[in-house]
């Protein structure tokens, strides 16, 4: 049970997924051709239109460096809700290639 005066949950949001109402079609540019052959084009609900979000720690570090230069708050990785986080890329944003 979460109490409204519990400070440990000050940034808690409740989200509901309603079947056949909240799901969206995945952007065709990012659907593997094998999905069409299987007849199962991914649908998403709580994402921005992609079935998987890959992020790297190097990219987050680069973003946070830019934010520091502008006197902005650092962002945690959880802000982007990635499915997969990798570390050890040669440079920031290599996961986009």
Image: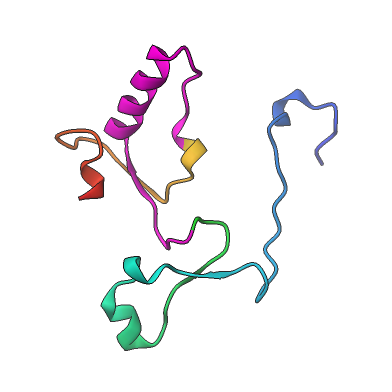
Q: Residue 36 versus residue 83: which sits nearer the camera?
A: 36
Is residue 31 placed above or below 62 in the rendered structure?
below
How many numbered marks are there? 0
Magenta span contains residue 51: yes
Is residue 95 placed above or below 39 in the rendered structure?
above
Q: Quadrant of residue 77?
A: top left
Residue 88 locus on image (x, y percent): 20, 35
In the displayed structure image, the side of residue 83 where residue 92 appears, left or right: left
Which quadrant would the N terminus be assigned to in this image?
top right
Q: At 37% from the left edge and 72% from the top edge, which residue is drawn? A: 28
Q: Residue pushed farthest left?
A: 90
In the displayed structure image, the side of residue 9 where residue 54 appears, left or right: left
Q: At 72% from the left edge and 29% from the top edge, which residue is drawn? A: 10
Is residue 46 placed above or below 31 in the rendered structure?
above
In the displayed structure image, the side of residue 65 where residue 23 appears, left or right: right
Residue 76 locus on image (x, y percent): 47, 29
Q: Residue pushed farthest right?
A: 4
| The magenta segment | 49-77
Q: At 43% from the left edge and 47% from the top edge, which residue is drawn? A: 82
Q: Quadrant of residue 11?
A: top right
Q: Quadrant of residue 22?
A: bottom right
Q: How is the image coloured?
A: rainbow
Q: At 45% from the left edge and 69% from the top edge, which residue is drawn? A: 26
Residue 16 locus on image (x, y percent): 71, 58
Magenta span contains residue 63: yes
Q: Residue pushed farthest front?
A: 70
Is residue 5 placed above or below 78 in the rendered structure?
above
């Amino acid at each position: 049970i979460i109490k409204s005066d519990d400070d440990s949950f000050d940034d808690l949001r409740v989200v509901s997924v309603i079947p056949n109402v909240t799901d969206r079609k995945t952007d065709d540019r990012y659907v593997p051709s094998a999905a069409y052959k299987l007849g199962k084009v991914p649908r998403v609900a709580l994402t921005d239109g992609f079935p998987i979000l890959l992020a790297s720690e190097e990219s987050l570090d680069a973003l946070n460096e830019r934010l520091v230069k502008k006197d902005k708050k650092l962002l945690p990785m959880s802000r982007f809700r990635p499915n997969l986080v990798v570390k050890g890329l040669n440079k920031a944003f290599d996961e986009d290639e």
